[in-house]
Image (tube, coloured by chain):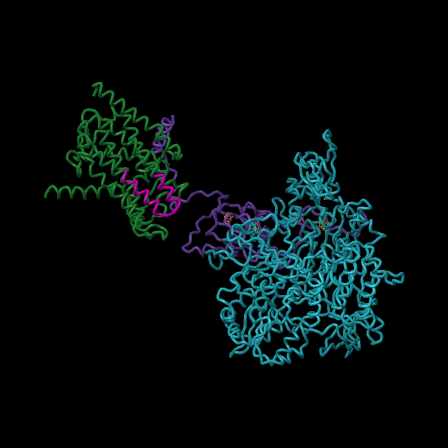
Amino acid sequence: MFITSAIRTMWLTFLHLFHKTETVQYPEQKPYLAPRYRGRIVLTRDPDGEERCVSCYLCAAVCPCDCISLQRTAAPGQWTPEHFRINFSRCIFCGFCEEACPTSAIQLIPDFEMSEISRQSLVYEKEHLLIAGTGKVPDYNFYRIAGVATAGKPKGAGLNESPPVDPRGLLP
Amino acid sequence: MNAILLSLIQAVAVLLGITLLAAGLTFAERRLLGFWQDRLGPNRVGWQGTLQIVADMIKIFFKQDWTPPFADKIIFTAAPIIVLTTVVLAFAVIPLGPLAGIMPNLNIGLLFFLGMTSLSVYGVILAGWSSNSKFALLGGMRAAAQTISYEVFMGLAVVGVVMLTGSFNLETIVAAQTRVWFVIPQFFGFLPFLIAGIAEAHRLPFDLPEGENELGAGFHTEYSSMKFGMFFIAEYASIVLISSITVVLYFGGWHGPWLPPAVWFALKIGAFIAFFILLRAALPRPRYDQLMSYGWKLMLPLTIANLAITGALMLGGIE
Amino acid sequence: MDLNHLHLDVDRTIITAQPGQTVLEACLSAQLDLPYFCWHPALGAVGACRQCAVKLFNGPEDHTGQIVMACMTPATSGMRLSITDPATAQFRDRVIEFVLTNHPHDCPVCDVGGECHLQDMTALVKHTQRRYRFTKRTHLNQDLGPFIRHEMNRCIGCYRCVRFYRDYAGGDDFGVFGANRNIYFGRATPGTLESEFAGNLVEVCPTGVFVDKPFATRFRRKWDMRATPSICPHCAVGCNITVQEREGEFRRVVNRHNAALNGYFLCDRGRFGIDFIRSPARLRRSTQRDAQGPGTPVAIPAATAALAELLRTNNVIGIGSPRASLEANAALRLLVGPAHFYAGVSDHDADIIATAITILRDAAVPIATPADAAQSDAVLILGEDPSDIAPILALSLRQSAQRPTSEALAIRQIPAWNDSAARRSAFGSPTPLIIATPMSTRLDDCATTCHRIAPAALLTLAAAIKTQLEHPSPADPTAIAATLRRASAPVIVVGGDSALMRAAANIVTTLRRKGIAARLSILLPEANSLGLGLFGAPPLSAALAAIQTGTAPHVIVLENDLHRRCETGPLEGTFHRIASLSVLDCIETPTTATADLAIAVGSFADADGTTVNQEGRAQRSFKAIFSTDDAPPSWHVLRNAGIAAGRLDATAWATHRELIDAMAANIPDLAACRALWPHTHDNIMQRPATLPHRYSSRTAVNAAANVREPPPFTNPDSPLGPTMEGLMPRSGLMPHVWSPGWNSVQANLKFPSAAEPGVMLFPTSACIPTELPLPHPPPPAPGILALPIRRVFGSDELSNLAQAVASRVGGPILRVNPADAATHGLSAGTRVDCTIGTTTVRRAIALDPAMAAGVAGLTIGVQGEPGLPLPGSLTITAIHPGEPS
Ligand code: SF4
Ligand code: SF4
Ligand code: SF4
Ligand code: SF4
Ligand code: FES
C-alpha cells in the first residue's frame, strides 16, 4: 500500500501545478511583518526616557550564539551597561534575549533589511541599538517595582512598598 | 570516410544536445518544483528566469576550484570525469529515430548501456574515497551498495524484453514494438526497471548517496566549481538517459502515429523527465535499510517471477 | 555492612551517613536536594528558618509520620524519612512564600542573582506565584565601608550573618535590631565593619544583602567568569581561594573550601587584597635604561635578550623573594648557580625561617593546621599576635576558645552541630586560651589568661613552662604548665623570635614525651617564606656584603622590593658598586624605579606556581588570568634568557613539570612538589574546564576589534583546561563549584571532600620530636625595645595596592604603655619621630595599657618606608605635639 500512497501523493503534488503560488515578489512587493516579527534588535527606554537595560546579563547568558556582550558600569548604584554589543553576523534572531529580558529593554523589531558587505559592519554597539522610545512595551518601568533606591526614588517609594522601618522602634 | 564524418558530426551533436539538455533541465526542474510547491522558482534572470542557466554556469565556472589538501588529487580529479564520460557514452547506443543515433545498431547495445551505467558508479565511489572525508566516504559506500543491489534486478528486468525480441540490439527492440509496446506484456519488467533506473541515477527518492540531511552532500561534499558541475550535469544527463532507454525498451521508442518519429521520441522522453521531477517533488527519501529491503525482498523476487512467467508463456507458445 | 556508617531510608532509597551528622547533612552529602537557609556547615544548626522540613516516620507501620527539621534531627541508623511527602513539600513551599512576602523585585540588579541561595531554594521548592498583595516592608541601607555594600531590603531574616560575625568571628560592631517583621541586621551607626572577616558575609548570607563592593565596580555574573583554583598570596597560612576572571581582567576572589586550612572562610586581606592585580601600581611595561635615558619601554623579547646579555657574563648574582613562587625562585637559582643566589629577606626574617625549617624538618615537631587549632583543648600563644599575621589561624583559635571541645560536648551529650547549645555550654568552663605576648592582641577578648611580658622574659617563661612540665612543682605562678598537662591536644602558637620558637618547640616535645598530642604552629611573615627558606640561600645582607667585597656584579632581583627589606643607607651604599640592576616584578616599586632593566612579569594569578605555607604544605596555584597582555610568568622570562645566554639547553624546562623536576633534583626537600600535578591529560577534553558551561558572549566579546573570533587560549603548564571544553570534576581540582540546581557558593556542601589538600613537605612522624638547643639570649639593648606590629591591612606589600584595602590602612602608630609614654612626655595621638638603626620614621602614639614596660610596638610595612631593623632599639628623636593626629 505504500505504492498506492506514493501514487496518491504524486497525484496531489501534481495538482499543485494549478494552485496559486505563495511567493511574495520582494522587494517590489513588501511582505506584511507582524509587530512581533523577530528582526533587528533594539534597546528601548522606559516611559521616563531612561535606559531600560539594567545590565543583568540574562540576554547574554541565554543567547544560543553567544553574540551579546555587555559590561555593567563601574559607577556604584548604576546598573546601565557601559558597553552593549550585538554581533549580528552571529545572531539567529531567535528572540531568546527578548524573552529573557526582565526589563523589556531588549526587543526584536520587524526590520530585517540589514545586509552589509563586510561582516565587521554587522557589529552593533550600544549607540546603534538604543532607541528613543519604549518599543512594544509602553508602560513598564522596572525601577518602580524594584526594591533598590534610584536617583528619583528613595527607599520605600516604589510600587507596593511601605516606608522604611525604624529598626529602633519597639512597636511590633 | 563520409560515414565516419557523419558519425562524428552526429556524436558531437548528441554530446552538445545532451549537455545543453541537462543544463536546461536544471532550470526546468527548479521551476517545476517551484510550481508543485506553490512557489515560483527562479524567475528573475532574463524572461521568466530563462537566463538562470547562464547565470549559474557563469557562477560555477568562476567558483574557486578547490581540491582539499587531504584528498587524493589524481583520483579526486578523475572521479567526476569518469561519471560524466560513462553517462554520455551510454547515449551512443540510443536510437533517436529511424536511422538516427550514433550507433543504434550495435548488436550488444543493451549490454553496452548496462555496462556504462555500472561503470559510472566507480566514479562515485572513487569520488567518495578520494575526498578523504567521512561524509564523502559514507556517500560513496552507499552508492556502491545501492548500485550493486539495484543493478541485479535492472539486468534481470530487461531480460524479459530480450527474451521477447531475441536481441540485444536496441534498434531491433524498437522495431519489435510496432504492434504493441513492451510495457503491456512486460509491465512487471518495466516497473523494476524504472525503479532501478531512478536508483542508478541517484535521483530522489533514491538519492541516499547524497543524503544532505545526514551526510552534508554525500560523495561530492568536498567538490566545488566545475568538478562539482560535472557531477551535476552527469546527474541530469542520466535522467535523460534513463528516460530514453525506458522509452526505447518499453514505450515503443520513436514509434507513434501522425507525428514525426523524433517528435514522438522527444515527447515520450519529456513525459518521463517530468515524472522524475514529480517524484522528487512528492516523495520523501526512504531509510537506508528500507531501500535495501525494497531491492532485495520486493523487486528481485518480482523480476524473477516476471522472467519465469514470460519464459513459461513463451514455452507455451503464447507470444 | 559498614558499622561506621549509618543507613537511612529516604523515600525508599538507602543513603549512608557519618555518625554525628544531621539528617540535612546526610541528605546533602548523598546529593539529595533539600532546601535550607539557616544551617551552615561551619556555623552549625539553630533550626530557625523551618525550611529544611522532612517527614520522619516512627517505624515501618507509621504511615502518618511527623514533620521535623532535618537540620535539628540527628541521623540514626534505620531512620525512615521522606523529602517528597506532599504535606512536607507544601510546608516548605509555605515557608518560602512567607520568606518572599517582603522580598524585593531585585534579581536583575542584585549582585548575587545567578548565584543566589534564595533563588536556588525557591526554584527547588517550585514556588512560582506570588499571592501576597500587600505592601512590602523596606529598610534603609548603611554604609558599611570599602568592602561591603548593604542592601537590607533583601534580608530574609535567617540570622546567619550575626551568627557568623558575632558568634563565630567575634566581631561586636554588627548585630540585629528591631523586632519581628522590622528586624534589621546592621551596625548601631553606619560605618566600616571592623572585623577583618566581614567579607565572608558576602558568602554567608544566602541573599544579596551584602555585596562585594570592589567586585561590583567590574561586575559579572558567576556563570560568566573563568574560575581557577589558587592560593592566597598575602600571608603564610596559604588559604585556598578561587580567582575569577573575565576578558583578561581580574574580577573577584571567593573562598575555596579546604577543611584543613581556611574551611569556608577567608580574611578580608585575601578576599579584597588580590585586587592589587588591577592596581594602577602594577608594572605594565618593561623598561630599560639606555641612551634615551632611564625607563625606555621595551617589549618582553627585547627585555629577555637584554637579560640574556647579562647572563653571558660570569658575574651575576640573583636575589630571590618570599612572595615569588618556588618555580620562579628555583629558576633564578638554577640560572645563576646556588653560590650566587640570595634569599632577599632581612636577617631577622631569615633567622626565623631557618629556625622554622629546623623545627619542622630536623626536629620533626608536629605542626598544627588551623583545623587542628580549632579542635584543640588548650592554646598557648607565645610572642606574636596571630590575628594580624595569620588571620585565618586566629579565627580557628577563636573557635577553640569559644566552643567546648568535642569531648566536652560528648560528656554533656550535646551534638557538635547544635550550635547554640554548644556555645551556651561553654559558659563558665571556657577552653583555655593563654596569651603571653609583649602587647595586647585581638584575641584577648576570648582569652582565659593574658600575660604581657617583654621578649626576654618570654624566653624565661617558656623555659619555666618546660621545667614545670618535666618536674611539676607546686610553685607554678602562671599555671600554664598545669593547664597544658591537663589538655589532650594542646596547640602552641609562636612567632616573632627564633629563640622563642625553639623554646616553644621544646615545650611541644616535652608534652609529646608525656603522651600529650601537642602541636606547634609557627607564624611566618610571607606567603612563600618557608619555600624560599628551603633553598638555603643566605639573606639579603650577605648579598650586599658580597657586592661590597667582590667585583661589581650584575644583580637580578626577582619579584622583590629591596627597599622594604633593609635600610636605605646600606642598600644605596652598595648600588654604586653593581654593574647593573635588573628587576623582574609585577608591581612598581622603588626597586623597579631604580633598575637598569625592569621586566614586567605576571602576578601570581598570571602564572602557574607553588608556594609553601607555614605548615610546610606545598600548594599549587594555577594561571587564572588569560589575556593577550604581555605578562609572562617570571620563570618563562628567566628560562628564555638562560637559553639565549647558553646557560640552559635549548629544551630546558619546556613545561612547568620539567622545571619542577629540575627543582626537585636540586632541592630534595622539595621533591614532594612533584605530586602536585594531580591530573595530567594531554587531551584537553579530559582536563577540568575553567570556564563555566554557561559562559556567554564568546562571539561578541572581541567583535568590536575584529569580528573574526580568535583561537582559544592554551596553557601547557597547567592541568586545567583553559576553555569550556573539559570535565566538570566531582572532586579534586574543581574550578567552579556547581551542582544542578545549586548555583550559589552553597553548592560546595554537595562535595564535602572535594578539596585538593596540597602536599605536606614534612609529614608528621610518630616518633618523639628532638629537643632543640637554645641560643644564649642577646645582651639587652639600650633604650626602648621596638617590636614590629604587622597589621592585617597595611603591612602586606601586595594587598596594600588594592584600592579597597588601601582605604582601610590606618595611620602608622607607635604603641607604648601609658607609664612609658608619661616618662617621655607623650600622650595618645602625639606624633613622634623615632629612629631605629639609621632610619627615622614618624609615628602617632597609641597607648596600650597592658603593654610590657620598656617595649614599643611599631607598625611596619608602611608604603614608601624602608625596611626597619626590627626588633631593635628605638630612640624618640623629635616630638610634634601640636600636629593633629
Ligand atoms: S535573537 Fe537569539 S541569537 Fe540573536 S541576540 Fe537574541 S538570543 Fe542571541
Ligand atoms: S536582559 Fe535586558 S536588562 Fe538584562 S542585560 Fe539584557 S537587555 Fe539589559
Ligand atoms: S537576593 Fe536572590 S532572590 Fe533576592 S533579589 Fe537578589 S538574586 Fe533575587
Ligand atoms: S542579612 Fe543575610 S544572612 Fe543576615 S539574616 Fe538577612 S538574609 Fe540572613
Ligand atoms: S536549615 Fe533547618 S531550620 Fe533552617
Coordinates of residue C556 in the picture (x, y in percent): 58, 73
- Tell me, yes or no, if residue C484 can be seen here: yes
| Horizontal relation, residue B124 to residue C707: left or right | left
Total marks in image: 0
Q: Which residues are magenta?
A: B118-143
Can you say whether C573 is above or below A168 in the image? Answer: below
Which image quarter holds the C terminus of chain C?
bottom right
What residue occupies the far left of the structure in this picture?
A: B1
| Horizontal relation, residue C546 to residue C62: left or right | left
Image point (42%, 43%), residue name: A31
Image point (45%, 48%), residue name: A112
| The quarter of the displayed image where residue C252 is located | bottom right
In the depicted view, which residue is nearer to us: C610 or B236? C610
Q: Colour of chain A?
A: purple
In the depicted view, which residue is nearer to us: A97 or C611? C611
Can you say whether C453 is above or below A52 in the image? Answer: below
| Horizontal relation, residue C571 to residue C505: left or right | left
Coordinates of residue C396 in the picture (x, y in percent): 74, 56
Coordinates of residue C826 in the picture (x, y in percent): 82, 74
| The quarter of the displayed image where residue B207 is located | top left
Coordinates of residue B238 in the picture (x, y in percent): 27, 38
- Tell me, yes or no, if residue C193 can be seen here: no
Q: Is residue B127 magenta?
A: yes
Magenta stretch, main secondary structure, is helix
In the depicted view, which residue is nearer to us: A24 or C848? C848
Q: Colour of chain C?
A: cyan
Q: Is residue B73 magenta?
A: no
Judging from the image, what is the letter of the chain drawn in green?
Answer: B
| Horizontal relation, residue B103 to residue A97: left or right | left
What residue occupies the far right of the structure in this picture?
A: C474
Which image quarter holds the N terminus of chain C?
top right
